[in-house]
Amino acid sequence: MSKIKNLRKVLASITASALVIGGIGLNAAVGTENNTVLAAAAGDLNEDSSVNVADVVLLQQFLTKKATLSSSMSADMNRDRKVNIFDFIQLKRNVVDANQGTTEPTEPTEPTTTEPASTEPITTETTVTTSTVVTDPVEGDNTIVLADSGITFTGTGATLSADNKTITIAAPGTYIVTGEMTGGQIVVDVDKTAYVDGEVELSLEGMSLTNTADSPIYVASIDGECVISAKKNTENTVSDGTSYTNADEGEGAIYSCDDLKIKGKGTLNVNGNCGDGIVSKNDLKVFNSTLNVNAVDDGLRGKDSVKIGDADDTEFDNLIVTINTSAGDGIKSNATDEGNGVVTVNGGTVNINAYSDGIHAYQELNINGGSIDIETTESKDSGSSKGLKSGYTDDETGETLTGVVNVNGGYVNANTNDDCINSNGDINILGGQLELQTKAATSGYQGLHADNSVYLGKDGGAYEDFDLVIYNAYEGIEAMNIYQKSGATVVTSADDAYNVAGGADNSGSTGGWPGQGGGGATGSAGGELIISGGFSVISVQDGDHDGYDSNGTLSITGGIAITNGQEPFDCDGGVSYTGGVYIKNTGSGGMGGGGMMPGGGSTSMTESVNASCSVSAGTRVTLCDGSGNIIVSFIADKNVSSLIAGCTAYSGASFYTGGELSGSTYFQELDDTQLAAYGGTLTGGTAVSGSSGGTTNPWG
């Protein structure tokens, strides 16, 4: 691509010197004999048996009366018996096309010209016109006024169709659009060789455009990007019909074959009644404006990428995106080539109500900022209705693209009819605030599901790195591996809260994670659950449900892990506790049903406190060290009859119920029913009697 772009720049510089700014039509009559066109090799002006940049230079000099041609017919590229700027443009296009995949072009040398062999004179007629074929961006006011009777255009750089229903913009510049029209179309078709890096801005200043037979705004070609700007204090609407196919054999109310940017401080309403709302086959950026999109299929689709919010901006008050879809995704990037298929949200307010997935990136999904609310409605049994999703599998070929979801900041609220966050690769929760819930708590509805690994926080991080609350799910967090390193996590689930190398999406007689034989196996399935930092408190339903469940290995080396349920911790492989704090607050005490103990791993864990109690749900439970300092304090989600803790770094630890916290820091405040805290002191609490010290098995 760089070779071709360099060639375009060479040709663009030639064009700039060939034409007078503002547009001059240069015509030369083509010699004929008995009304028969003279034979000539099209484009080979210097008769060297090759059509290249030197011929372009020679034609430029001929049109500007600086050279002559031995045969004018070789310059008549479109065979209209005239030699003019249109032949010049066609010749340039032919040279670029012929150079696809060739070596780097060089600046042309001055061509050698000869006097024409024909005795018939070649005359040049120079006429000043309002030609729209120019090589510099148009300047001044360019105004497009829409009306049902037809489009009116004032300025340069664009032409109207014979019926005044279509305006085609052929030169970079800013074009003001006003008025209302049904049956019209704005086309951007700018020659990429003549205008390298050229940009067109459509300044929407109170307009409405509907076209039921085509894409109302269609960008056919632009080397730089097309910018659609909704001006401040204006409302603008673009709507298509219910059945059509545009020139690119696609559908979209706003459809671009090249890069597209939406911005401005006004309002833009887009109604995609046939398929997608806004489409770019390259990069789609939404950097500003109040953007409302209603679409049958996808709301926003940028094949290579979609970016919401400029990463260089610090204020996003004017960026509000609302998307409603009746049969597709809210936002999608679906490129399969390496480095593309990326969706990034840097800021703004994004509200999505999608039939299918809220945001789907085939390869990479990044949440760096902003406030995102997602609701999905399609039944997971009939399709995919996830909140944030990355990865792709071709249903016909089985080819898979491995995706990744990165949450680095911002706020995400997802209420989904499927997994809230799903990746066929990794999920990285490194920052921000997340409130997640599934619409059902039956098999297959996960808060987070990754085919590979879920990373909660980073090494050496802090409790404040992120807040993750899963209010409702069948399984809270499910992956082949789970690594809790920092941040604060609260999970309420019907089945397992943390599930490693197992779960609803991979269970059954033929299911299972890689290395696992399927449901019911009691041996190690591979995978690991490692808690090395951060905070988590989880609550599961009574019965055969696990708090922290690993079908591989499980180890706690740091951080805080609090769980209730009949099976607070469950592990099929080796277990290890070497640091940090764990707490079991259970009603039935330990694992039931015999429990699956480690196969060959350690079963002996240090138990610092073991106390019998009778604590009602909703009561504050606090673990203090021997000096009365709070190690951790939390709210019991269920009635508790047993409190067990491992906290080897603290001496004389004891449990207390009730009381008031002083000088403590809450881990998170999104879920005000679970205001767990650390640090400070407790006043007015009631001590829970029990033993401390010893080495037993706290896993059951």
Image (cartoon, helix red, strand yellow):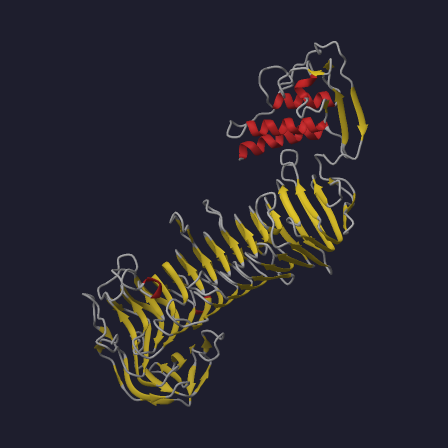
Residue sticking out furthest to the left: 600
Whether residue 108 can be seen here: no
In this view, the residue in front, 457 or 510, is 510
Q: Indicate the quadrant where residue 536 lies.
A: bottom left
Q: Nearer the viewer, residue 355 or 14?
A: 355
Q: Residue furthest right?
A: 128
Res 511 → quadrant: bottom left
Measured from the top left, where is residue 286 in percent x and y? 60, 55
342 lies above or below 31: below
At horizontal 59% and vertical 56% (from top left) the residue drawn is 309
Is the residue 590 above or below the residue 147 in the image? below
Q: Is residue 634 left or right of residue 118?
A: left
Q: Position of residue 602 (x, y in %)?
A: 20, 68
The number of numbered badges drawn on the structure is: 0
The quarter of the picture where the C terminus appears is: bottom left
Residue at image point 77% right, 13% down: 121
Q: Position of residue 93 (x, y in %)?
A: 62, 30
Kindly tell me whether residue 11 is visible in this rendering.
Answer: yes
Image check: 98 left or right of 642?
Answer: right
Question: Compared to 558, does 657 lie above or below?
Answer: below
**Viewer-nearest residue: 547 or 217:** 217
Instruction: Please provide percent x and percent y for residue 552.
Output: 27, 63
Write the residue at 80% across / 25% down: 126
Q: Quadrant of residue 521?
A: bottom left
Residue depicted at 22% across the width and 75% down the height = 697
Q: Nearer the viewer, residue 49 or 636?
A: 49
Horizontal relation, residue 243 to residue 126: left or right: left
